[in-house]
Amino acid sequence: MNRIIGTMRRLDEQHGAVRVEDVYDTGIDDLWAAITQPARLARWVAAVEGEPTLGDTFRAAFTSGWEGPARVEACEAPDRLVVTLSPGADDETAIEARLTAEGDRTRLVVEERGLPLEVLHFHGAGWQAHLEDLARTLSGADSAWQPRWKELTPDYEAMVVS
């Protein structure tokens, strides 16, 4: 059985949220850079066109295949980042990342809200694979997103959405 670091919950009759969290062997400032600097983001989760700054729209292309506009809604370095995907569209979602220093390590909690319930498990597996890729890139290894996502998907599909 896979180690599962995520949970899923229902927000309303059609939408839900995925929450994943893990602790990384790096300081909060380094992890903040890994989740906000375009060159570092491209190593584990998404290629970004433009400089993501508060209130501005930029383009993102995730390793999962999703591409589109995104906007930084909140940026409170080095503790909290909120990004909206597809701002203003019917399929808009919000991704919130919270960082907490734990000695010389850092806890990262990522939650994506507004996802359709019928595909929630795909996103749960995807976010776990992304966070595992983040740990790999921090140690100098390459992404393994696609095979890991495929491996995790049945585990997330079997989970009950609360």
Image: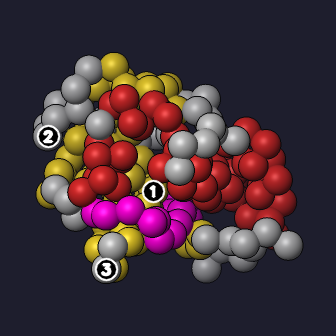
Q: Is residue 5 above or below residue 114?
A: below
Tag 2 residue: 54
Residue 40, label in figure: none
Q: How far apart, in angstroms, are the residues tagged by discs 2 and 3?
A: 29 Å
In the image, residue 73 lies at what x, y percent?
A: 20, 47
Can you see residue 64? yes
The number of numbered badges drawn on the structure is 3
Which amino acid type is shown beneath numbered disc 2? Leu
Residue hosting label 1: 112
How far from the left and from the top, in percent, is residue 87? 31, 36
Quadrant in the rendering for residue 108: bottom left
Q: Please tell me which residue is depicted at 68% across the width and 56% down the height of the picture.
A: 125
Front disc: 2 or 3: 3
Q: Is residue 6 above or below residue 83?
A: below
Look at label 3 and name its amino acid. Gly
Mark 2: few, some, or many residues within 10 Å (few <14, many ≥20)?
some
The magenta segment is: 11-28
Which residue is the site of mark 3?
103
In the image, is 24 to the left or to the right of 65? left
Cα distance in 3D space between marks 1 and 3: 27 Å
Labels 1 and 2 touching (C-beta < 8 A) = no
Instruction: Give the residue drawn at x 69%, y 51%.
Output: 122
- Left or right of 64? Residue 83 is left
Which corner quadrant holds the N terminus? bottom right
